[in-house]
Amino acid sequence: MVYSGFADRILKIDLSSASHEIESRGENFYRTYFGGRALVAYELLIGTLPDTDPLGPENVLVFACGVITGAPIGGTGRNSVGARSPLTGCYGDAEAGGYWGAELKGAGYDAIVITGRSENPVYIYINDDTVEFRNAAGLSGLATAEVEEIIKSETGERHVRVSQCGPAGEKLVRFACVVNDLRHFAGRCGMGAVMGSKNLRAVAVKGSGKVVPRDPELFNRVTEWLRKNHKKLAGGLHDMGTIATVEALNISGGLPTRNFKEGTFEGAGAIGGQALKERYLVSRGSCFACPVSCKREVEVGEPWKVNRVYGGPEYETAAALGSNCGVDDLAAVCKANELCNAYGLDSISTGAVISFAMECYEEGILNHGDTDGLDLRFGHAREMIELIGKIARREGIGDVLADGVRRAAKEFGKETNLLALEVKGQEIPMHEPRLKHGLGLGYAVSPTGADHCHNIHDTLYSKMTHFLKDLNPLGILEPLEASDLSEAKVRLFSYETAYRHFMDCALMCYFLPFDRSHMVDIVRSVTGWDTSLWELMKVGERALNLTRVFNIRSGFDAGDDCLPDRFFEPFDGGPLKGISVDRGKLEKAKTTYYQMMGWTAEDGIPGRAVLAELGISWSHRFLEKGNRPPRRNT
């Protein structure tokens, strides 16, 4: 089987009846939505109701590729996983790298749309046209590596690709992630818990097909450019990985430390990229067709044995379970990373709920009796590691923390609200809004709750860097300070985030050094479409508006587009001493953004005209008052 862009086959699975069917949408559907976020949002709008229980059988779970997924060039092995989020109650999705997405496209599917709930634990095995529902009762409670090995043995396919929810998903931990091939993660929004709620432990895929570009000459020009330039432009990622960001952000004063109380960490050098490279790095892993090979593989002997099969910590993990918990023990960070991967936990939210509990303990809100006897002061690595297991198994205090910081704060008492750092219920990623003020706007208005991926990182545009030059075709010509929240910054933010939403529809990795013209050429050469940057930007805008419609229909409004109070408080020390986000400027920027998007200035509701301009007039019916619940009581 050979595909160019899309297979025009969506696999619809009903777990309640253990049945499946194939649905075709036609070329115009794929050119409109591409895949990924836009396709997921489409399925959730037409397939769920405003009161759908995220952990109920009526929730829709979508695994989606994009139109360039599986093309033989770096960055195209990704897939998205989406559903109504059990962590936030709003639109939820996350993207994972590795090989699973390319394998699904090779099997001849653009997406899998899953409804219902299996009566007994199952995993789905897909081998081209064969779709089997297999008994997974014997997999319950097992670590992800054990499950992958059993599935490979049972299917007789050593190269089958396995996407699974892990034991944390089975226990309905609200920030359980979806794990691809043990070391690639659709980490955010609790998609693993949705899998667990459906009694679906894994989806294993083997495909014999391949993607062949329609314009091989143009495609080969791009691949040749990547071959010649990836070492120069992305060699640092290969050498050090994203964990090198620990030292860089510490220097700038924007490294989240002790639950974001501080922006510098005295132990940053001990948990950063150079230390990992020198002490525990044994190899570098990769994703489908990618020459960069940025993934870490580590081994630790003492005091905690860490298996390289689970990869190694990236930046977000090192900050969330390192500096933000006050832990400067790199071996402990590696062990914490292994446990998150083995249990199927989002390492960002895991670190965030632990740092929240640590601050509550230090403030005297929690005591030994509340913490099952754990001394949860900042910097206590052994207690942090023990707490990860308690969260994954929902034991003791771990049962409370497994529901996320917003729900835990309600359980612990109102005095903890200021310590619970989240947006719409999702924990803050490891990037500091007091360093990057536009990023703070991005946290506030993100459709998934706080997110650092479909966002801007202001420091990249504060000088005439290649990041800024790449925005020149969109008319963004001048650098802006990282603390700027002017109309010009909102314009930059709106353009850049629309493009990032497109990238999450196409499912292209952010870390490949392609500029916007390369992306146009990749899409053009793979699909054969006479496309343009303008069309790609519209895909991103379309996806963003569909997610906004979903959230408005679910009872969210402008009041949910906010930041935790901590970020309006200045730092007491460090390079950013005295710096905070200005609440008034943020609110003004939010209103300006709404207006730039064609949304109502007061409530951020997409107008009929902008939906029509994007070709999604059909979605406006979900915004009519009779189809919307009253404002949520958060």
Image: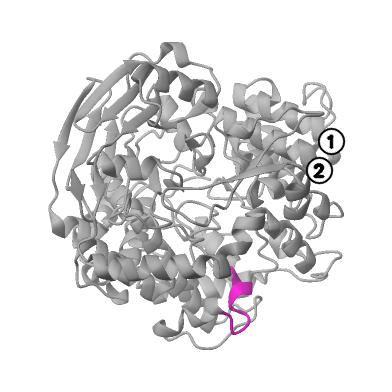
Q: Residue at x 49, y 73 (%)?
A: 493
Q: Is residue 240 left or right of residue 498?
A: right
The residue that label 2 is drawn on is 327
Q: Position of residue 336 (x, y in %)?
A: 69, 35
In the displayed structure, 295 sits above or below 445; it is above
Q: Is residue 133 left or right of residue 551?
A: left
- Any part of residue 10 in sight: yes
Q: Position of residue 313 (x, y in %)?
A: 65, 44
- Any part of residue 403 in sight: no
In the displayed structure, 507 sits above or below 484; it is above
In the displayed structure, 426 sits above or below 594; it is above
Query: What span is in magenta?
Result: 457-465
> Looking at the rendered structure, which numbered label has been put on residue 380?
1
Tag 1 near tag 2, CB within 8 Å: yes
Q: Residue at x 63, y 70 (%)?
A: 437
Asked which quadrant contains residue 598, the reply is: bottom left
